[in-house]
Amino acid sequence: MKTKALLFDFDGTLLNTNELIIQTFMYIFDERFPGQYSTVDCLKFIGPSLKQTFDELTPGETEIMIAKYREWSAANHDSLVTGYEAVVETLEELHALGIKMAIVSTKSREGLARGMKILQAEHLFDAVVGLDDVEHVKPHPEPVLLALQKLGVDRSEAIMIGDNSHDIEGGKNAGVRTAGVAWSAKGVDYLMSYEPTYMLHHMRDLLEIVKGESS
């Protein structure tokens, strides 16, 4: 069936926040677990929600740790995030083709707003689903299904796109096609192990997918 909607993860997919995330975790860990974590260790914390991460690492201190994380991240956000090649231009072309687009993220509404201000692409998205909008985050299907509901499209008409296993699994659990991005900090091989429908080596690959489908 023809693709009518594209659902995007945000961090590490549309905006390069990897350095910000890693440095924020290192700040937290250097204080809480001095000498126990390296920057490479922090890669595994890219993707899960902060609650999932700190529930596991610091049970009983989750809210305190999230507050510390968000404070440092907010103070350093604009200096550490960078863009990916041709992301906004491709989004504009997809929008011009009539493709509906949504953000489906584990980030808070406040954090997403900060990132979207940098990306300057708010006008291209028909819906935003973040941490504050759902009870269960990816890989639970709830966020993806909510985005489909907001866009008014069937699951067969959508693709979930992301840089992490949670995005691929969340899309599969919701019954939509999935696409991994080769610019993921965890690498192509990692994402391919979750068997996404597509692997995007460049953002413009989405245009080829959408345009190449029969109507």
Image (cartoon, rainbow, N blue to C red):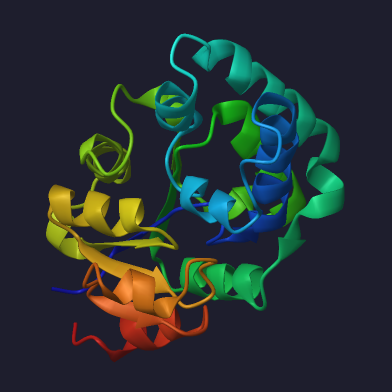
Q: Quadrant of the rendered structure where residue 105 is?
A: top left
Residue 14 image position (x, y, % from top left):
57, 61
Judging depth in this view, the residue of 27 and 121 nearest the camera is: 27
169 to the left or right of 68: left
Identify the residue shown where x is 40% and y is 58%.
164
82 to the left or right of 99: right
78 to the left or right of 107: right
Q: Report the number of discs.
A: 0
Judging depth in this view, the residue of 212 and 52 nearest the camera is: 52
Residue 42 image position (x, y, % from top left):
57, 49
For the C terminus, the image quarter is bottom left
Residue 197, can we see it? Answer: yes
Q: Is residue 128 above or below residue 90?
A: above
Identify the residue shown where x is 34% and y is 25%.
134
Q: Quadrant of the rendered structure where residue 183 is?
A: bottom right
Judging depth in this view, the residue of 120 and 35 nearest the camera is: 35
For the N terminus, the image quarter is bottom left
Residue 31 image position (x, y, % from top left):
74, 27
Residue 79 image position (x, y, % from top left):
87, 50
Q: Is residue 137 above or below residue 175?
A: above
Identify the residue shown where x is 52% and y is 36%.
107
Identify the residue shown where x is 28% and y is 59%.
168
141 to the left or right of 13: left
Q: Is residue 183 above or below residue 51?
A: below
